[in-house]
Amino acid sequence: MKKNIIAVAMIIAIMGMILPASVFAADKPKYAIVFKNTGNPYGEKQLEGFKAGIEEQGYEAILRAPDLPTAEAQIQIIEQLIAQRVAAICIVGNDYDALQPVLTKATKAGIKVFSLDSSVNPASRLTHVNQADSEKIGQTLIAAASDMAGGKGEIAILSATSQASNQNIWIDFMKKELAKPQYANLKLVKIAYGDDLRDKSVSETEALLRSYPNLKVIIAPTTVGIAAAAKVVTDKKLVGKVLITGLGLPSEMAEYIDNGACPYMFLWNPIDVGYLGAYTGVALVTGKIKGAVGDKFAAGRLGNYTITKAPDGGTEVLLGPPFKFDKANIADWKKVY
Ligand code: RAM
């Protein structure tokens, strides 16, 4: 008996020496994340956090994003991931409803599907990893615009794509907020879409400035849009006349906070959003949670989380409150993300 055990142990040891590590790695469950599109530093940080969270739990991460932020392009990637038999798909949706057929197909193939950052509809997901309270983001951005406009005048929104569900939810809450009596003198003149593409965001900002010469504030609830808008205002020497606020990446916005184009802005830590997604995915695959209200799980260095009801009727995991960035703290944060 003892001899047999020793023989088996020796065989395992020899196999470990002669077989490449990839043979063993091939059995590791794969966790995929699909961002909106490539070329967005915010997205890269989110993917980096997801990868770190998956790998520290001993699994393999697959990081994907199409060239353009469309639902069609994400559908192709999801089809490939289904064929690859991944354990989970974490989708940053380019459309709230259009991904439902392919995500349902993934679910039927036994893949745990959930969204992050930009949600898909509740029928397509087990839960959603939300970066911050959507209503509070809307309220905070309108309060900031009102503050910068001195309580009255024209404001505009420069968003991502017209289909991006995260931006659309925030814009809906901004509109609700604007309907309150204290904002009666603020006029939202236009919602423009830069599609989270740098050049399009620049040309949309230029068009806003041409069409609305009295514009006081542009709110860009997208890191690509806010950086483009601040650059245009700076290049056109309009700093102080038109102010920019919204959701920005400190590393991209530091120079525009320093030069006054953007007095202050908000964001969460995108690395943490991805990292929380990684722990949500593993908790779903291992059966620790189902994505139901009240489900609890531990998310590594971030601590404990509980799934709650989302405003759209589905469920969500909320990372925490957003941070405010201004001249006083931007120098420290621009090095972090
Ligand atoms: C852009 C993307 C992302 C959003 C941030 C605020 O990078 O649209 O989805 O969460 O802005």
Image (cartoon, rainbow, N blue to C red):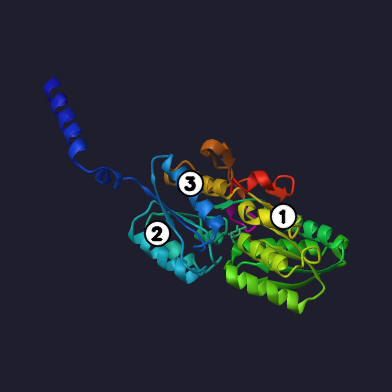
Give the numbered dot on residue 278: 3
Give whichever of discs 2 and 1 has the lower sequence position: 2
- Which label sits in the foreground, 3 or 2? 3
The Cα atoms of the two marked residues, 1 and 3, are separated by 32 Å
Crowding at mark 1 (Cα within 10 Å: few <14, some 14-19, many 20+) = many
Q: Position of residue 306 (x, y in %)?
A: 59, 42
In percent of the image, x 64 and y 65: which residue is there? Answer: 228
SS type, badge 1:
helix
Closest to the observer: 82 or 194? 194
The Cα atoms of the two marked residues, 2 and 1, are separated by 48 Å
Q: Position of residue 225 (x, y in %)?
A: 64, 65
- Which label sits in the foreground, 2 or 1? 1
Closest to the observer: 287 or 141? 141
For badge 2, the amino acid type reads Lys
How many numbered marks appear?
A: 3
Residue 126 visible to an observer of this rendering: no
Look at the picture and state if 24 lies above or below 188.
Answer: above
Give whichever of discs 1 and 3 has the lower sequence position: 1
Furthest residue toward top: 2
Q: Over which residues does the magenta segment extend?
A: 310-315
In percent of the image, x 57 and y 36: which residue is there? Answer: 303
For badge 3, the amino acid type reads Ala
The Cα atoms of the two marked residues, 3 and 2, are separated by 21 Å
